Image (spheres, rainbow, N blue to C red):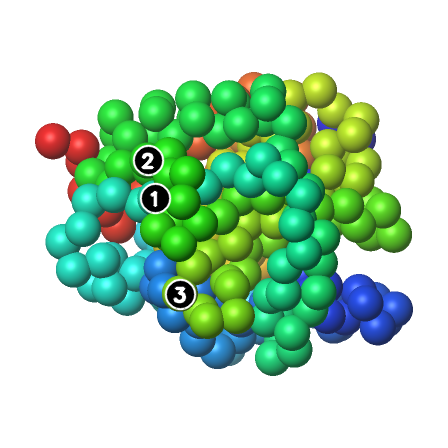
Amino acid sequence: MSSPLTDIYALAIIRKGTTKDSECMKHLPFAATFFTLIGAFALNPSGASAKGTRCSPNPTPEALISSWAAKTVAHMKGRTNVRVLMNQTKQDIRVPIHGEDVDLTALPLKKKDIETAEKLASRLNKIISIDLVAESSAEKADLFVTAVCEPEHKSDYGIVTSDKSGKKLIMLINTCSDVYRNYKGSFGPIFLHELGHVLGLEHPFDDSDGDCMISTERFSAKSAHMGQTLMAYREDPNDGPLDFYTATDIQALLKIWGPNR
């Protein structure tokens, strides 16, 4: 790949037509549990570590475990499945982003992308204690995965937010992004990256919780890369496969959720 993978940071900002780097580097108010949005955390735009933060010089699972992971597990109250609805219809949706309601058109996912997501979910189910299960009812779904088309922001590929009630997570995949359009097989790593956030993983450069992996820089030669964690933005310099989570990602997920039994 010649284009770095990046999250869509704020469709509210996008709609206003302002895309200053300092604004786009602020992460949306993320779902700290499967059902409740909490306050935003900001990434450090300078690339320097926050005071007192020391990045691990090597890939470590602890550096990927987010500040919201423990709350997510606690909120599950022993539940062992997450009901996932893969969108197959065109529909209008309204989602809260940065405190504003944003109107979007949810587009049906391609059949091959749904099949890819189901295969990846099945593989993950065999590793961690949480099971991602297919759901056909919008009312019962915990996570709604849908395509959107944002051609004006073709370098941005995805985001996780919630519905207006805050009780259902919504994963938006930008199928008009350069990554999705130009690179065969890109849906898999995009889905896994965003799913990683849902399950409690953070970016390796995020030091808002007091730790980080390798560097707080996102794209430089100093940054962690996707060969080390799919939660990174920088490409793998060794051009390795991106067909599943890395060993470090899996270790982090196991620390959060425990092994499948």
Q: Mark 1 points at which residue?
A: 83
The image quadrant of residue 10 is: bottom right
In the rendered view, tell whether residue 207 sits above or below residue 137: below
**Relative depth, front residue between 178 and 115:** 115
User: Callout 3: few (<14), some (14-19), or many (20+) C-alpha neighbours within 10 Å?
Assistant: some
**Label 3: which secondary element:** loop
Instruction: Tell me the CA gap for discs 3 and 1.
Output: 13 Å
| Earlier residue among tags 3 and 2 | 2
| Earlier residue among tags 3 and 1 | 1
In the rendered view, tell whether residue 36 sits above or below residue 245: below
Q: Is residue 89 visible?
A: yes
Amino acid on which disc 1 is placed: Arg
User: Callout 1: few (<14), some (14-19), or many (20+) C-alpha neighbours within 10 Å?
Assistant: some
Q: Which mark is residue 133?
A: 2
Q: Which residue is drawn at 35% across and 24% down?
A: 123
**Label 1: which secondary element:** strand
Instruction: Tell me the CA gap for discs 2 and 1.
Output: 5 Å
Does residue 21 appear left or right of residue 125 in this picture? Answer: right
**Label 2: which secondary element:** strand
Q: Mark 3 points at which residue?
A: 167
Circles 2 and 1, Cβ within 8 Å, touching? The answer is: yes
